[in-house]
Amino acid sequence: MVEAKLFIGSDIEEKPQKGERKSPYDGRVVSTYPVCGAEDAEAALVVAQKAFEATKKAPLSRRIAWLRDVARQIEEERELFARTITDEIGKPIAFSRVEVDRCIETITLTADALTHLRGETLPTDATPSGRPSTAFWRRVPAGVVVAITPFNFPLNLAAHKLAPALGAGCSVVLKPTPEAPGVGYLLARAFIESEHAVRDALSVVYGDAEVGSALVSSPIPRVISFTGSVPVGNIITKSAGIKKVSLELGGNAATFVEKSADIAHAAARCAFGAFVNSGQVCISLQRIYVEEPVYDAFAEAMAAESAKLKVGSPYDEETFMGPLIDDEANERAMRWVESAKKEGARVVAGGELVEGIFAPTVMADVTDEMKIVCEEVFAPIVSLVKVKDFDEAVKKMNDSPYGLQFSIFTNDLKLTRRAIDSFECGGIVVNDVPTVRFDIQPYGGMKLSGVGREGPQFALEEFTEIQSVVIF
């Protein structure tokens, strides 16, 4: 069991009241954490504000060494991190290890990207109104960063914020998801206890709305980096004031399976993309638009592929899918299925709880009017929609308030080019699911799916400001 600590800067602060995190799989208490309030958030921000004077002056070589040391520490404690992820959120242990490895890569990629953080000289005498000078622009650390992270990838998505923010020379206050306080604590501890750490550069506070509101509405932070739901993102946007705000929000990921596609391959990958992490992924495949001639064959293949997935204990090395984050999520998933059935859809796989775990569920004969394709489900449920051709598919895919990632399965090169030009989203995948994300790439959405981009090279832009310099 992990006992998470409150870090106000580099110092541990004791709190009289402790909260408990219970396993979503078996109900055991798997971690404890200090119960924080707005006053703790405010104290952390004050410390971060003072620490920024040191973090912005820390040599780049020190910051790079810091990140590499943290990556090394995590690698040495790989099993502890993986086990804590599985304990707190129920992610199958094999996928928890993958998340730890991706976290190490994210931090290492950020260290590499820092060597390319540069500006550009400008010819100020290029116009008649100008005159000769030595002029350039550069990137400088933005200031205090508030990082608020989600439960579905509690380690790697926190690393996507902490590594580039601290690497850029900012100071940070982290509020990890309430569902995984232990994971947030272990990651923060690795940064804070590193021999290369800048003192007080990172604070960690725990809590939900009260703590988050205090962090976001304070005049101290210069950047708010949030990953989570659209409603909360809306609240943050309205209460943050004049700050840089980076939002990674919801999605309603879709793919189009065209008649020339390899149906067996498409079905296997779609089952993975829809049900990995129990569908609790912003880019979890939720809508599959299938061209009419191959619809029945694809539906049959999807049902068969779903049946192959091992569902059960997240501690079993062979388990593909474990429990949803809590009982409320199970109830919500069941309501989605019942609602779609009443509207005329049919269940071709799953649609029920199996030993307390919501089974991988494939819904067929889904139409545009059904709620199950209009809103983000965030559960292991995928909908099959029959379409006449690509034009109908792209219209339906784009007819969503979300625009995170889409994909297409096809062997038609011309259609691939049309898809790239037509999809209204932040990321496009060809011949695989929209759930594919490499940590090196720019990641973010259009429309209600967010503002800003993650990925080490691109996140550094979110945590820095452009400063222009002219010397005569």
Image (cartoon, rainbow, N blue to C red):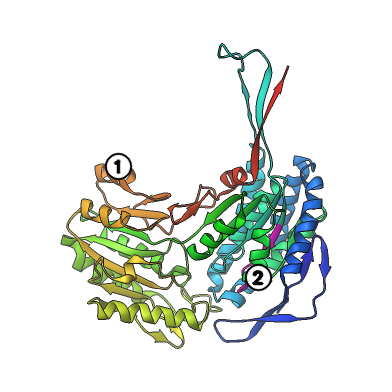
**Image disc number at residue 398:** none
> What kind of residue is marked 2?
Glu
Q: CA distance from mark 1 to mark 2?
A: 47 Å
> Which residue position is annotated with label 1?
417
Residue 334 position within the rendered picture, expressed as x and y whole percent measured from the top left: 38, 82
Q: Residue at x 66, y 13 (%)?
A: 132
Query: Magenta stretch containing residue 436, yes or no?
Result: no
Considering every residue shown, the one lying at the far bottom of the view is: 355
- Label 1 crowding class (10 Å Cα cut-off): few <14, some 14-19, many 20+? few
Q: Given the image, on which type of amino acid does mark 1 rest?
A: Arg
Quarter holding residue 192: bottom right
Q: Could you say whether the residue bearing mark 1 is in a helix, strand or loop?
A: helix
- Give the residues in magenta: 173-182
Q: In x, y percent, where is residue 6?
A: 77, 69
Q: Say whether residue 181 is magenta.
A: yes
**Vertically, is 131 above or below 330?**
above
Which label number is shown at residue 210? 2
Q: How many marks?
A: 2
Task: Give the answer, above or below, for where 138 lies relative to 53.
Answer: above
The residue at 58%/51% (across/down) is: 245
The residue depicted at 52 percent of the width and 77 percent of the height is 325
Instruction: Indicate the secondary structure of the residue bearing disc 2.
Output: helix
Q: Please identify the quadrant where the N terminus is shown.
A: bottom right
The crowd level at tag 2 (other Cα within 10 Å; few <14, some 14-19, many 20+) is few
Q: Is residue 221 visible to us here?
A: yes
Q: Nearer the viewer, residue 414 or 325?
A: 325
